[in-house]
């Protein structure tokens, strides 16, 4: 069995390797219903592969529900490491990555301002996921809460044909993307307070 976030998208990968199995849809909208079904399939002796459109399944996507359901049934789960935008963006950012925190998607409305103010005091580098249509707003919000001079990077379409990483301060990046004309899956990496202080001191010398 192959469970895929987008069966049409995954068909391209499967066709490339000559895999004829028909993938089953497993996505946000049906994960709560499908996760127990995945556990039942595994319990029946079937091998079930869970694949996502991009990145590692289970990271900021509904894959964790299936893993939890299978684990709760006392059944085995195997993970095959692959490309993940978290570590890829961290390395490409050029920021300190000896310690970091993964924030995923920031709250859209409720709790957003509170979370931003908490991040303003975070000493570690921060990894944030964002969609293209909300990138500009998030960069402006981050600049307002953490300071426009905070070092950061915007990584887009990682490991894909149109991969791009733009580095600068939050203020510079917010200005660059203010027109909203950007596509693809996006990762924002922001320096923590420790590196930000070093950056300011260096610029003041």
Image (cartoon, helix red, strand yellow):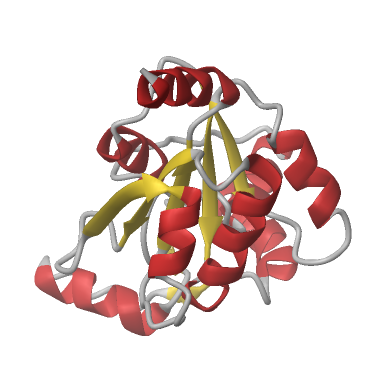
Q: Quadrant of the C terminus?
A: top left
In the depicted view, which residue is nearer to us: 161 or 31?
161
Tell me where residue 153 appears, x and y as whole percent: 38, 47
Q: Is residue 41 left or right of residue 188?
A: right
Residue 26 figure quarter: bottom right
Q: Quadrant of the N terminus?
A: bottom left
Tell me where residue 198 appears, x and y as whole percent: 45, 17
Q: Residue at x 53, y 70 (%)?
A: 136
In the depicted view, which residue is nearer to us: 155 or 161?
155
Residue 6 figure quarter: bottom left
Q: Residue at x 26, y 39 (%)?
A: 92
Q: Is residue 53 above or below residue 169?
A: below
Q: Residue at x 45, y 42 (%)?
A: 189
Tell me where residue 50 appears, x and y as whole percent: 44, 56
Residue 106 appears in the picture as rendered: yes
For the image, the number of numbered tags is 0
User: What residue occupies the far right of the structure in this picture?
Assistant: 110
Q: Is residue 83 above or below residue 175?
A: above
Q: Is residue 68 left or right of residue 114?
A: left
Tell me where residue 166 appears, x and y as whole percent: 29, 54
Residue 51 appears in the picture as rendered: no
Q: Residue at x 35, y 47 (%)?
A: 168
């Amino acid at each position: 069995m192959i469970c895929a976030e987008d069966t049409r998208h995954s068909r391209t990968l499967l066709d490339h390797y000559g895999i004829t199995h028909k993938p089953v849809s497993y996505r946000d909208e049906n994960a709560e219903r499908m996760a127990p079904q995945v556990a039942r399939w595994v319990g029946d002796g079937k091998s079930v592969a869970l694949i996502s459109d991009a990145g590692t399944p289970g990271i900021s996507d509904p894959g964790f529900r299936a893993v939890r359901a299978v684990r709760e049934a006392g059944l085995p789960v195997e993970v095959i490491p692959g490309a993940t935008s978290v570590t890829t963006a961290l390395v490409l950012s050029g920021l300190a990555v000896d310690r970091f925190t993964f924030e995923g998607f920031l709250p859209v409305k409720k709790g957003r301002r509170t979370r931003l103010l908490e991040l303003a005091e975070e000493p570690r580098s921060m990894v944030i996921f964002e969609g293209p249509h909300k990138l500009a707003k998030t960069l402006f919000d981050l600049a307002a809460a953490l300071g426009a001079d905070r070092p950061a990077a915007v990584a887009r379409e990682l490991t894909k044909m149109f991969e791009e990483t733009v580095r600068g301060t939050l203020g510079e990046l917010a200005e660059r993307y203010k027109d909203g004309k950007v596509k693809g899956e996006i990762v924002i990496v922001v320096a923590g307070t420790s590196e930000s202080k070093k950056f300011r001191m260096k610029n003041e010398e």
